[in-house]
Amino acid sequence: MSTGVSVLQSWSEVGEAIHFLDERGYRLHHNPMKSWDLRLISQMVQDFGRTELMVDLGASVLGGVRLLHEMGFRRIVGYDLKCSRFDRVLQLRDWLGDLTRASRPTRLPYRLRKRDLLETGLADASVGAVVCLSVIEHGVDLGRFFAEMARILRPAGRLFVSTDYWEPKLDTQGRSMFGMPWTVFCGREVESMIDCGRKAGLVVDQWVPEDLQCHEAVVRDGGHAYTFAAIRFRKT
């Protein structure tokens, strides 16, 4: 499952994801529904070398970075506009856990940086995979986003993007979430996103429009009922 498009179709899929993570000893996301994302991420990067640089954009609450750490990756960086004191406490706790299991001191399990995800400052072609959980629906300039991802990913590197989603289109104009703009993407907009990524050099190899159909509205928030979509890109 290196590339493709997935839509969360039911609560039973959330349960399957929770079982998948628990069976492997991975922590669940603090929002149980986002454990669905973590399962897809683990499958996307399972064949990567553990010394590859892995990046989580929108790393607040640490779902992505902690999963990558538990999978054995040793070079992990999480970016967000802010890193809370709670995030730092979790980072310290994970580091202390590493110390108790190691025969010698270890470095931090992952690094957290306050920075704009459109300007990561990372070197060209230096990253194996980027994960971005439910961030792009909050006013992100997709043209700039995909240009930056294409710049930092190595050839054949992968990008995981998830977003709020429903088909047909939901009107969220004038609504905000977490103090930021909020869009629930529809099928046409996801297809445009895939085309935007392709123009930047990021492709989705295995998908058809039927993959964007949705059934159960798993999420209810902001006065709307919707679900999640995940798109997995590969750098050409």
Image (cartoon, rainbow, N blue to C red):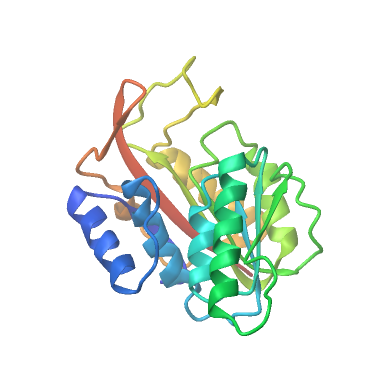
**Left or right position of 226 against 89:** left
235 or 115, nearer to the observer: 115
For the point 65% across and 79% down, the residue is 51
For the point 48% across and 54% down, the residue is 63
Residue 102 vs 98, above or below: the answer is below
**Residue 58 visible in the snapshot:** no
**Residue at the extreme bottom of the image, as rendered:** 103
Q: How many marks?
A: 0
Image coordinates of residue 48 in percent, x first then y, are 55, 79
**Residue 226 visible in the snapshot:** yes
Image coordinates of residue 212 in percent, x first then y, are 33, 49
Image coordinates of residue 108 in percent, x first then y, are 67, 65
Residue 167: name its quadrant: top left
226 or 19, nearer to the observer: 19
Quarter of the image where the N terminus is located: bottom left
**Left or right position of 116 against 37:** right
Quarter of the image where the C terminus is located: bottom right
Image coordinates of residue 141 in percent, x first then y, are 65, 37
Residue 5: name its quadrant: bottom left
Residue 148 vs 44, above or below: the answer is above
209 or 148, nearer to the observer: 148
**Residue at the extreme top of the image, as rendered:** 174
**Left or right position of 32 against 109:** left
For the point 38% across and 41% down, the residue is 187
**Left or right position of 70 against 37:** right
